[in-house]
Image: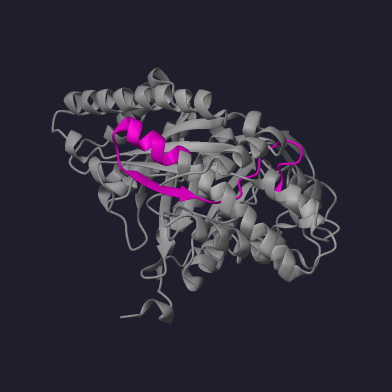
Amino acid sequence: MEYSLEEVMETVKMTLYDNFDIRTVTLGINLKDCINPDLGIFKSKVYERVTDYGKRLVTEAGKLEDKYGIPIINKRISVTPVSLITESCADDAPLELAVTLDKAARDAGIDFIGGYGALVQKGMTKADEQLINSLPDVLSSTERVCAFLNVGSTVSGMNMDAVIKLGTVIKDIAGRTDNGLGCTKFAVFSNAPEDNPFMAGAFHGIGEPDFSLNIGISGPGVVRGVVEKNTKCDLTGLSEIVKRTAFKITRAGELIGRELAANLNVPFGIVDISLASTTKVGDSVAGIVELMGIERMGAPGSTAALALLIDAVKKGGAMASGNVGGLSGTFIPVSEDSGMNRAVREGALSIEKLEALTAVCSVGLDMIAIPGDTPSETISAIIADELSIGVVNGKTTGVRLIPVPGKKAGDYVNFGGLLGETYIMEISRFSSRDFILRGGRMPSPVTSMRN
């Protein structure tokens, strides 16, 4: 793929003036061939592979930063879902492997390592249950390990027995970490993509090659800039402008991704074109929506504005690359987006409106702080509500809830760094306990029968 000098200069301009960056380069690594009945040998093989490729990823990414002047914010690794490679191991193997992964990521200079998780949308094996039970220990004792569970899909329905367990598990994780910080490293999905480069939900899927280099780009600042300059055009014209901007962003991301993959001698995977917010001023998805004419994110019209925005981004990304994948939507994390946080503080945005917004964007209820005394059954019910949107509509949805110990609705919490800060959201006081505790499996929708 050839890139013109004009395209390169356009990328430099976006970087200098609009906060454009590569949010993450994520190297997917297959660990299935590291499996060994001797846990010591197994862990040694995993450590060597992760550190070897991790160090190379960090080095080569640094070279490209210097060459193009485009910041690469995070260098990450995703691995084969851990429950799949510990099936024949002792009960404590998942925890021991998590400690090994954490040490390997630290020694290699990797920011986060994902894949500590399981695919349980239709049921749980013994290894899956062992991994789920280990989550509080793992996320309170490791620094860089990120965890995921896929508990629902359009084809399989939703595993409500797993959802029941998660309410208790999430509260346990929160209780063991400062301000519930461990919960920021755990995401629950329906229809989880196997090539997602973003944490906490990244894992190296079964249908992937031994290695795959996936790129997550960040362009809210760039999109905000063009929206701010076009306040008078109609929505058709605005969509066209955003689409062209997304095209440029995606081309820049693919440039970095393909060259980095070639330098690492691994296959290039995908570009995830999600608009990923940061805590920086001007780097907010909520800010874009407000510039489109919504007084405050969460006001009537917000869902329509977000739908128009993400549709334009997807169209532009699809025009620019045949390798768009991952989540490729618009992220609306509350604590990581200053505009979302402000909307919560001012009462414009409720958890119910956030759920409505996720019908048209990706990820779902993300980085939402809730009162620490929220019942576990209510947490499970919120997860079930959100993931049902994904199951029924054939799209990816996810949940990252943080029940902050000792905090109540309206209180403030600061998670630090890119995780940002937020106010505790109010949760309905009415119970869903009797419904949730029925358990079983929610059947797949009729739309799953497409053959």
Reply above or below: 434 against 8. Answer: below
Q: Is residue 114 visible?
A: no
* Quarter assignment of residue 302: bottom right
Q: Left or right of 153: which side holds 311?
A: right
Q: From what the image shows, is residue 147 above or below residue 190?
A: above
How many numbered tags mark residues here? Answer: 0
Q: Residue at x 68, y 64 (%)?
A: 239
**Viewer can see residue 243:** yes
Residue at left offset 71%, top offset 42%: 283
- Residue 115 lies left or right of residue 200; in this view the side is left
The extreme top residue here reads 107
Task: Give the image location of residue 183, x and y in percent.
Answer: 55, 40
Q: Write down the region rendered in magenta.
A: 256-284
Give whichever of 10, 131 is nearer the camera: 10
- The quarter of the picture where residue 415 lies is top right
Work out which residue is located at the far front of the displayed protein and give it: 5
| Of the pair 351 and 247, the residue shown nearer to us | 247
Quadrant in which residue 260 is drawn: top left
Q: Is residue 276 above or below residue 46?
A: below
Q: Position of residue 93 (x, y in %)?
A: 27, 33
Q: Nearer the viewer, residue 157 or 9?
A: 9
Q: The C terminus is located in which quarter?
A: bottom left
Q: Is residue 272 magenta?
A: yes
Where's residue 154, x and y in %? 41, 69
The location of residue 113, given as percent across then percent down, is 41, 33
